[in-house]
Image: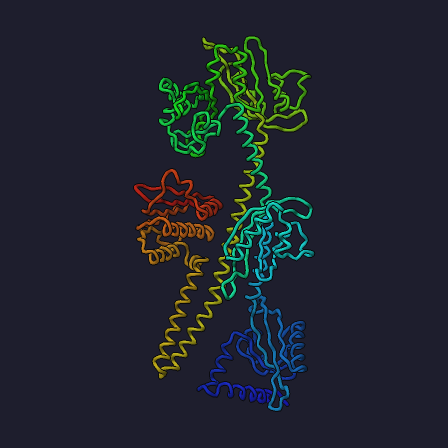
Amino acid sequence: MNLATDRDVIFAQLAAAAAISLAALDGGFELLAMVFESSTDRIFVKDTLGRYLVANAAVTEFFQRPLADIIGKTDTELLPDDRAKVFATADDEVLTTGRSVNFEVGATGDGQPICLYITKSPIRDQAGNIIGVIGIGRDITTRKVTEEALRLSETRLAAAQRIAHLGSWEWNLETNEVVWSEECYRIFEINPTTFQPRYGTVLRFLHPSNLERVNAVLSAAAKFGLPFKDDFRIVRPSGEERYIHMEGVVTAFDDDGSPSVMTGTIYDLTERKQTELALRQNEANFARAQRIAQVGSWEWVPSTGRHTWSAEALRIFGLPSDYRRPLLQADFVRFVHPDDHVAVAAAIDAALTREVPFDQTFRIIRPDGVERTIYSLGESHRDDDNVSVMTGVCQDITDKQRLHDQLTRSEGNLAQAQRIARMASWSWDMRTGKEVWSDHIYEILEVDPTESGMTVRRLLEFVHPDDKTKVTAAFNPTLAGAAPHAVEFRVIASSGRERFIQSLGDTVHAADGTGTSVIGILQDITERKAIEAELASSRDEMRELTNHLQNLQEDERRRIAREIHDEFGAVFTAANLSLYRLASLLQSAPAATLELVKSTKDMLANAGKALDDIVNGLHPQMLSHLGLVATAQWYIDEFHRRTGIRCVRSLPSEALPIADDHALTLFRCLQESLTNIAKHAAASRVQIDFDVTNTHVYLTVTDDGRGLKPDNLAAAGTFGIRGLQERVAQHGGTMRLQAVQPRGTRLSVALPKPQ
């Protein structure tokens, strides 16, 4: 049988099958031919010798040859040997077994690597004999790329969990089986190849003191489907205790509405918990030291009334432990005895305007009417907002003042030294040159007090070489009786250990103003410095992790939005085309039938609109295609349509020349601010302004809602606003949230243009 005869026979078999399938349709063969030629799948027919008899346009595009050069040829003549061998092997299997085969193969299309999923089936004559092979090749490159992106995303998620010490889990409430991420096994220090997590087996790792409570919480959450969060301790197989924070939520329900699956996270907060415990212990020790020494500490911003008092300072002034009312300068002076008003007010003004140290002894009248004598020492500095802040200590010296005439000078010096607990004190008699140091200095420097006495000169020998110039410059004016000093520096103890020291010193003057002695204190602040460094490092790491997770989240939202749009958009388009054709075929059908078709089209349109809202909520597609200005215009109009709030906007007349990630950040700021206005502001009007300079892009959103009070601006930062602040800071920008007069709130964002 020659090639033409083979083709005629196979065509006859295909025509017979098509005739049966399309007998009810007019022009059925023409429709089959149209589908055959317009299909993007590669459809072909071969004879038993592997020669191509039929091929559609997609096949000719794949081979990059005209149809005449393909018909009658085999894969060996058209493809490289290795690929032709794969195709020929599949043909042989179909012809030999009579069964269909499916396989994937790499290929090249338009010069680019692609992946094809090929299905080959036998063609039989009326007697059942195999007379050829029909095949369909589908391009699955996009699916493969998507699968690889998903695998990469899962790998990155696992890495992020490992960095953050954050594991994820899923609990089947019906079988009690638990699925853990890799980080969960690391947190519990368990080998995943030898341990199968189940609810009962996991509970065995809980600390005995937490077991009953956590079991009750989990049982209640599983029974009623409520979200939960809890902190507890676990005991690893090695016996080590770890602090764990766990959260969970029901993610699936049975047909009867009962919870069936719960999903959640586990976070190892041991290091943070240990730091918090150490910090609380230090704070408790400091409070205890103040109570023992009867010395209180305070920080005060006279311009705003913001203040922080230690427990001992509140006790000294007779104030309740929960005293939080703003304390302006006029309010503070009311505590002071009327006879001391002028002196105290002058000392405060001097500290604020000339940064003169606040060093005052004055009387107060406490709320209970009791009069006390207070000695307070402080100094003024400016914070990051250039606002004057006063910091200092205070001591109730009422009893000491009553005995002042009976105390000797040495006892007076001792009383001053006792103002500070757990610190080394020293004094120097400027007339005799005699120095007196408390014993704690020897503990700080780790030297034997019996070897030789301590002096200022000997102290300088322990000062870190890099700090000697600073220490000398601070001490010399004090030793000369010219000015007090307050300096922080490092010392190297005899053991070689480096310590941080805070030194305060002042000159004691006689009645005629001449200096008589110098007194000072030295405090070992090494532990505080270490905690400050750890906290700063922890904040930096959390900020980096937050930025990383935000970027991952945006990438994932962008990917999901694109896949939803591509997959379901194609389905809706095909469904609409099918309904359009069905409507044309049913022109003479009853009105109820036509109405059903119309309502179906309307439902598809509404579903398409809902799909667009979901996609745009994840990641606005037009932001990538039309830019920030057009997307902002669209979102503002949508916001007005949904809420009825009047929107006045001032937007650039053309697209902004900024990077995609900067545009996305500005859009998220606009989106979050309008969402907060709709939820919380009760506003009737919103003003949106975009301003562009050579160096920055500015976004301002102002509403006329209920606004924010000046004393709760700091508390206004929700998680959404804090997330935006981190996102803006990541790009070197700034964001401010402030109240406006007479009412309303303004969000301002300044983002530098990338160079």
Residue 386 shows in the view: no
588 relative to 730 in the view: left or right: left
Nearest the viewer among 235 and 434 is 235
Please determine whether, in this image, residue 58 is positioned above or below residue 245: below
Q: Position of residue 237 (x, y in %)?
A: 68, 48
Q: Position of residue 573 (x, y in %)?
A: 44, 71
Residue at left offset 56%, top offset 73% = 138
Please determine whether, in this image, residue 532 is positioned above or below residue 28: above
Q: Position of residue 313 (x, y in %)?
A: 47, 27
Residue 228 shows in the view: yes
Residue at left offset 52%, top offset 52% = 228
Please determine whether, in this image, residue 509 is positioned above or below residue 164: above
Nearest the viewer among 551 and 60 is 551
| Colouring chosen for the image of the structure | rainbow
Nearest the viewer among 60 and 101 is 101
Tally of marks: 0
Please determine whether, in this image, residue 500 is positioned above or below residue 696: above
480 relative to 668 in the view: left or right: right
| Quarter location, residue 70 | bottom right
What quarter of the picture does the N terminus occupy?
A: bottom right
Q: Position of residue 243 (x, y in %)?
A: 59, 45
